[in-house]
Amino acid sequence: MRILLTGGTGLIGRALCKHWQRQGHELFVWSRRPDQVAALCSGARGVAQLQQLEGLPPLDAVVNLAGAPIADRPWTKARRELLWRSRVDLTRTLVEWLGRQRVPPRVLLSGSATGWYGDGGEQPLDEHSAATRPDFGSQLCAAWEQEADKACQLGMRVALLRTAPVLAPQGGVLGRLLPPFRLGLGGRLGSGAQWMPWIHIDDQVALIDHLLQRDDCSGAFNACAPHQVRNAEFTRTLARALHRPAVLPAPAWALRLALGEMSVLLLGGQRLSPRRTQDAGFAWRQPTLAPALAQLLHST
């Protein structure tokens, strides 16, 4: 297939490019740093402008994963504007460009996040559930999905991937957690009672590939492991895998003081089931947390 990616130089995008290059797909990455794409993305071709693809054979699929990191710094006004532009405005530009193509791709797989649901507390949630308590993150995801859904009007199949925090050997959630936990300085966040959805990088890549191949899969899919854990269980399991204690919790008040509204990413959560993902026939490589962490730590 001829596949266009946005966000191809990110954690998930790089893993996807490596996987798809082995399968022989032809890959293009829309990037602000097109000269770095070949090195970062396993030889994919970088394009600075979508117009560079015009005149070439039609694309078969588009995978839209672009977006500035949401948890890197507090949600100031300037940061909110950047997060919005890098997701909502970019997706609008992408879909408008697709609408001008003589032969649009068959499928658009567009990123979103489990934050779409807001802080769900103890409420069991799946893809059929409505959003719960709205915050900036959930509003951002909702607007992001709405822009992607407009590709349906072009006759394209649209799948929306609500991704949980991704566990990978380098970067992502583990990249932030491993340094303090390896020093024995880790612990739960707040009470630790909040649910913490997660997914192994190998399953994230396999799920995107699965949804791309399945012509009957459209709408929202939760990209999270079926094994549900609370934050306290996650931190205990990580500490145990590292043979370290987990006795230094981060107080909720301190996180709220330091991060403001963004603290909902750490103190809130979703008791989330990947119901439609399971119904689509996807089989997890790493469905439970302890073996997933063991495999990842062995890879670091």
Image (cartoon, grey):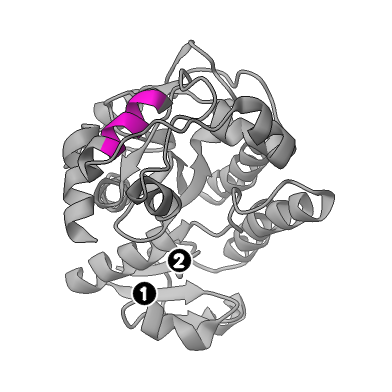
Q: Helix, strand or loop at disc 2? A: strand
Relative vertical location of residue 183 with respect to residue 13 in this rendering, above or below: above
The spot of residue 252 in percent (x, y) is: 61, 26
**Foreground of the two, 22 or 196:** 196
Q: Residue 284, percent across and down?
A: 19, 38
Whole-percent x and y of residue 69?
Answer: 58, 55
- Residue at far bottom of view: 35
Q: Main secondary structure of the magenta part?
A: helix
Q: Which mark sits nearer the N-terminus, 2 or 1?
A: 2
User: Is 297 situated left or right of 190 in this image?
Assistant: left
Residue 85 image offset from top left, x and y in percent? 72, 57
Horizontal side of 218 relative to 150 (left or right) equals left
The residue stretch that appears in magenta: 232-239
What is the three-letter code of the residue carrying label 2? Leu
98 over 138 or under it: above or below: below
Q: Are marks 2 and 1 in contact (CB under 8 Å)?
A: yes
Q: Residue at x 18, y 69 (%)?
A: 23
Instruction: Categorize mark 2 by other alpha carbons within 10 Å: few (<14), some (14-19), many (20+).
Output: many
- Asked if the magenta segment contains residue 3, the reply would be no
Is residue 181 at all visible to an observer of this figure?
Answer: yes
Pick whichever, 4 or 250, lies toward us: 250
Residue denoted by label 2: 5
Q: Which residue is mark 1?
A: 27
Cα distance between the residues tagged 2 and 1: 7 Å
Indicate the secondary structure of the residue bearing disc 1: strand
Q: Eyeballing the image, is 197 above or below 124?
A: below
